[in-house]
Amino acid sequence: MSMQTWWLFVMMTFVVSATPGPNMLLVMSHSARFGFRAALSTMAGCMTALLAMMSLSAAGLGALLQAFPSVFDALRWIGAAYLAYLGFKSWRSPVQDENASVSTESVGTSASSGRLYRQGLLVAASNPKAILFAAAFFPQFIRPELPQLPQFGILLITFSAIEIGWYLVYAGSGQRLAAYLRRAPVLKTFNRITGGAFIGFAALMATARH
């Protein structure tokens, strides 16, 4: 792999990863609600799912999903249902009006690392199009006449570094929002926005075609 090819991959991945999606929204939301350190568990869950899906695409699962649309559709609907559930839960998340405080589900409360990790894992894994994306995107930068596994490893490490970098950016943004979210009216608006965004992502996934 030439340095020019690698830099092209870096630039394209930088733009793709920066685009707001369910993973970034979840990381930002958890950082705003539970703190930056807690959001690290969410990031770990998202990255675990993404790395697994990228590896599966290299192993040929992407071609399998393309060959059997019914499998892809089943995974797509399951993922859409889970995102819609998260959206509904966020939308209905209770807040308290007394003393401009928030409920135990809101800012400043604790959440177990395992719970945040699982949510990150499930949200990232809920989109089977990530496998198809990797199956279509990564081969563009791999030279078939050279050993492919080392090239895939370089691309995967590079992708992970850029993705984690953007997670940190979104988590930092969420942390800055936390002070404002201690006011119940602001938190309620935030819950409605994030909940609506997750439901919107669910609708997009439900209508997606590979």
Image: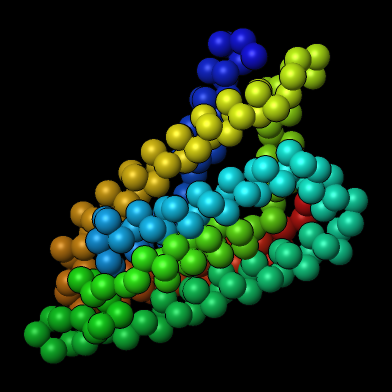
Q: Quadrant of residue 137?
A: top right
Horizontal and vertical percent position of residue 9: 58, 24
Horizontal and vertical percent position of residue 181: 21, 68
Relative to residue 146, is residue 80 drawn left or right? left
Q: Is residue 160 visible?
A: yes
Relative to residue 177, is residue 100 drawn left or right? left
Q: Residue at x 70, y 27 (%)?
A: 149
Most extreme residue toward the right is 67
Relative to residue 114, is residue 38 drawn left or right? left
Looking at this view, is 124 or 102 the one in front? Answer: 124
Q: Quadrant of residue 148?
A: top right
Q: Residue at x 25, y 61 (%)?
A: 35
Q: Is residue 187 visible?
A: no
Horizontal and vertical percent position of residue 86: 50, 74
Looking at this view, is 207 or 6 the one in front? Answer: 6
Q: Residue at x 27, y 56 (%)?
A: 37
Using the image, determine if residue 72 lies above or below residue 5.
Answer: below
Using the image, determine if residue 162 lies above or below residue 103.
Answer: above
Q: Residue at x 86, y 58 (%)?
A: 69
Using the image, determine if residue 139 lies above or below residue 46.
Answer: above
